[in-house]
Amino acid sequence: MASQPNDNDDSGGPWQLSEEGCHVALTHSHLDPSAVMNLVRSPSAGAIVLFAGTTRDNFAGKPVKQLQYTAYRPRALRTMLGIARAVRAEHALRGVALVHRLGVVPVGEESILVAVSAPHRQAAWRAGEEALERCKDSVEVWKREEFEGDEGGVWRANRDGAVGEKVSE
């Protein structure tokens, strides 16, 4: 049975849902790759794949100062858990962990960690990428790219290359 998110919790998180073999979380804290890998570690898994999405210093030729993430937390957690369940079943995984950071994420720091474990590496490689793509496609998380100088910021869906809308301060 999954634990339930507290919709009125403004503590900064982490907000999380877990069930056998699946763990998802949203947090304002720095992400810990070792801790996330430990969530999927299993004696029957011969492979653990970890993807760490980091803030890069540019987008479309513009210098990026930082990213800022926001989410509709209750729905985002349920969507993430659904992705974890589906990917785990489709690839016979031992574990799936999806952890997304919210708030300001400076250049060079991680905004998402995806960890999967499987008996063999091929399933782990495929499942890790699939889980990430499903997260980017459907999880209720939005990002604001804040540019250096007078460029301001752009809110966009959390998808690679998606067109954003310029936000005036």
Image (cartoon, rainbow, N blue to C red):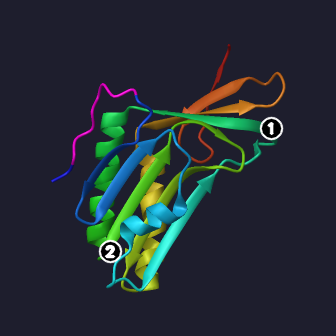
Quarter placement of the C terminus: top right
Query: Which sits in the foreground, 40 or 73?
Result: 40
Farthest residue in the left direction?
Answer: 1
Tell me which residue sits at (76%, 38%) in the image: 64
* Residue for badge 1: 62
Q: Which residues are magenta?
A: 3-10
Q: What kind of residue is marked 1? A: Lys
Q: Position of residue 59 (x, y in %)?
A: 74, 43
Tell me which residue sits at (42%, 43%) in the image: 26
SS class of the residue under badge 2?
Answer: loop
Position of 41 with respect to 158 (left or right) is left
Q: Position of residue 55 (x, y in %)?
A: 67, 47
Position of 2 with respect to 60 (left or right) is left
Of the residues tagged 2 and 1, which is closer to the observer? 2
Estimate how packed mark 1 is, as few (under 14), some (14 to 19) or many (20 or more) residues with alpha carbons within 10 Å: few
Spatial separation of the CA atoms under disc 2 and disc 1: 39 Å
Quarter placement of the N terminus: bottom left
Q: Position of residue 51 (x, y in %)?
A: 54, 64
Tell me which residue sits at (69%, 26%) in the image: 153
Q: Main secondary structure of the magenta part?
A: loop
Q: What kind of residue is marked 2? A: Leu
Q: Is residue 98 above or below residue 151?
A: below
Q: Are marks 2 and 1 in contact (CB under 8 Å)?
A: no
